Image (cartoon, helix red, strand yellow):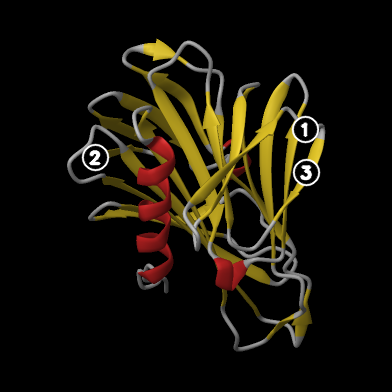
Amino acid sequence: MWKLNANIALLRRERFSCSLNLEKPDDGLADFEVDGFPVAARLLRVAAPMRPQVADCYLRGNDVVVTYHQTDHIRPQVVWRAEPLNASEGLQLSVTLALQTSQLLSDPQSQVISEMPATECLAINFDAGDATELGTPQTLAVGQTTAVLFRPENQTWSMVQAVHPMDYLSSELRCRNTTELSHALFQDNLEKGVILKGRVGLWLLPRADDAEVAAACIRAFVAAPLPLTT
């Protein structure tokens, strides 16, 4: 599904398309289109202690694997993954951030952020599988086993995003001119010889039965093994 042209990765999958500038990980998946129409969204933005200078990048199956030059003694690697959803026109996306350090201790604090036009929001508890209307809160804390389902107005698709519960630190939903969902990762100091990994999943779904489909997708994501990093 990916095509790599220098440091630009292009994703095309049936209804959805976007681009990823590997030298701007904080921009995330941009130039987002659904059914050929642009959507003002930036998805799975990675804000981490990194110098956005690519040391190595390649495609591996459904993954774009990017290693960045070391900065502040931290070596980051990011894996963006795209997979079709079985029996639907949907798309599953995820980002895995891996950090290691050459110092005895380093500060690894990072965030993964998605933003899109203001929209209807629901909280999905993917343990229980139920959905709760959130309205348009200004700022809301999102719990460890809670995903946020977005339903853009006048659209036939929905989006849901969740951090893997093993990697949960804190999450916030902010609704102002745009809707922004951010996940904080890696509170503790990063020790030499340790690789920290954090995972965030995002799903683009047909609107019909989106909450039920989303809960099932997230449970599968939680049970899946970590993507390989080096």
Asked whether the beta carbons under mark 3 and mark 1 sit within 8 Å of each other, the answer is yes
Mark identifier at residue 21: none
Among numbered discs 1 and 2, the one appearing first in the sequence? 2
SS under mark 1: loop
SS under mark 2: loop
Res. 138 image quadrant: top right
Mark nearest the camera among 2 and 3 is 3
The residue that disc 1 covers is 137
- Say what amino acid the circle numbered 1 marks: Pro
Does residue 176 show up? yes
Front-lying residue, 18 or 182: 182
The residue that disc 2 covers is 1
Among numbered discs 2 and 3, the one appearing first in the sequence? 2
Front-lying residue, 151 or 134: 134
Residue 104, position as x, y percentages in the image: 75, 88
Residue 200, position as x, y percentages in the image: 52, 55
Front-lying residue, 132 or 210: 132
Q: Residue at x 36, y 52 (%)?
A: 217
Front-lying residue, 216 or 103: 216
Residue 157, position as x, y percentages in the image: 39, 25
Q: Quadrant of the N terminus?
A: top left
Above or below residue 43? Residue 99 is: below
Report, in whole angstroms, how far the alpha carbon at label 2 lies from the one at label 3: 34 Å
Res. 225 image quadrant: bottom left
Give the class, few, some or many, for how many residues have Cα within 10 Å of label 1's Cα (few <14, many ≥20).
few
The residue that disc 3 covers is 140
| Total marks in image | 3
Residue that protrudes farthest toward the left in the picture: 87
Above or below residue 149? Residue 230 is: below
Give the class, few, some or many, for how many residues have Cα within 10 Å of label 2's Cα (few <14, many ≥20).
some
